[in-house]
Image (cartoon, rainbow, N blue to C red):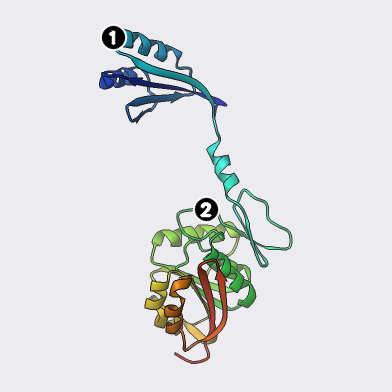
Amino acid sequence: MSKYYFELALKPDNHYELFLDLLESLTTDAIEENEGTLIVRSEEELEDIKFGIEEFSKALNTNCNISYDKKENIDWIKEYQKSVKSVEVGNFFIRPSWEEEKENKIDIIIDPALSFGSGHHETTSSCIEAIDEFVKEKQTVLDVGTGSGILAIAAAKKGCVVDICDTDEVCIVDTKSNFELNGVTFNDSWVGSTNKTTKKYDVVIANIVADVLVMISNDLKKCLNENGLLIISGILDKHINRVLSKFKDLEQVKLIHKNEWVTVVFKNNKEF
């Protein structure tokens, strides 16, 4: 990419379509139309085109406001990367691939994508906080609505046997890539929710939204082993009582409140 580019902007008082036709005949660069102004940008100088527009304007006896500038190119990828910061949650360090890992921390690499979950949102960070505190090595874990897979990866990094599911197939594909990026593996995956499995788990994680948690509450509980843990999140505090009422048959172990978001850790003391 060149260090500079050239920008030619023209706004004719009339005969707009004629000026547009002329520009299209003079350049193969993209032409931006913005409220009566025509803009051409190129890494090549545009002096000849500017001269042609001026002569064309004179021939039509039409006033045309023209500006011509040399501008510095910005490396948008680098600018974007600067805006994406790493996150430290307990013993975990979540970072994009272009940042260095942190010594003595459990390293998770997540590059921002369309799927949800890069560690910055309160629900994600509080779920990782819960995983850090409660999830133990060799436990079986199901991540429901896995998104980017960050929570499943956190469990896998602690030595757990992890299954993942999501109703969006794109998320499953993203999660598989993220697992490979982090050098860990999952046990099983499927497109759908908890109603597609008959397995029981030591830990079930569901960072979704309140309405869905209420809807699938019984399915989530059916997936729990005796004394299994359920970590739920994605709950706005105004909905917390409605959600808690659906899980009142479980023991509430911890409630994490970050800004307007709530994450709850439950323990299963009965058989469903």
- Name the foreground residue: 208 vs 159: 208
Look at label 2 and name its amino acid. Pro
Quadrant containing the N terminus is top right
**Dividing the picture into quarters, in which one does residue 94 lie?**
bottom right
Which residue matches tag 2?
112
Residue at 38% x, 73% y is 211
Residue at 67% x, 51% y is 100
On screen, residue 249 versus residue 105, left or right, reads left
Name the spot of residue 80 as percent of width and height, x first: 55, 44
Q: Against 126, is 228 above or below?
A: below
- Name the foreground residue: 20 vs 245: 245
Quadrant containing the C terminus is bottom left
Name the spot of residue 11 as percent of width and height, x first: 35, 21
Q: Against 84, is 1 above or below?
A: above
The kind of secondary structure element at disc 1 is loop
Between the residue at mark 1 and the residue at mark 2, the CA separation in whole angstroms equals 53 Å
Residue at 53% x, 38% y is 76
Residue at the limit of the structure toward the bottom, as seen here? 270
**Dividing the picture into quarters, in which one does residue 126 lie?**
bottom right
- Circle 2: is it few (<14), some (14-19), or many (20+) Cα within 10 Å? some
Residue at the limit of the structure toward the right, as seen here? 104
Sequence order check, earlier mark of 1 and 2? 1
The kind of secondary structure element at disc 2 is loop
Whether residue 63 is visible to the viewer of this picture, yes or no, is: yes
On screen, residue 90 versus residue 62, left or right, reads right
- Name the foreground residue: 144 vs 265: 265
Q: Are marks 1 and 2 in contact (CB under 8 Å)?
A: no
Name the spot of residue 22 as percent of width and height, x first: 31, 17
Which residue matches tag 1?
61
Name the spot of residue 206 as percent of width and height, x first: 48, 72
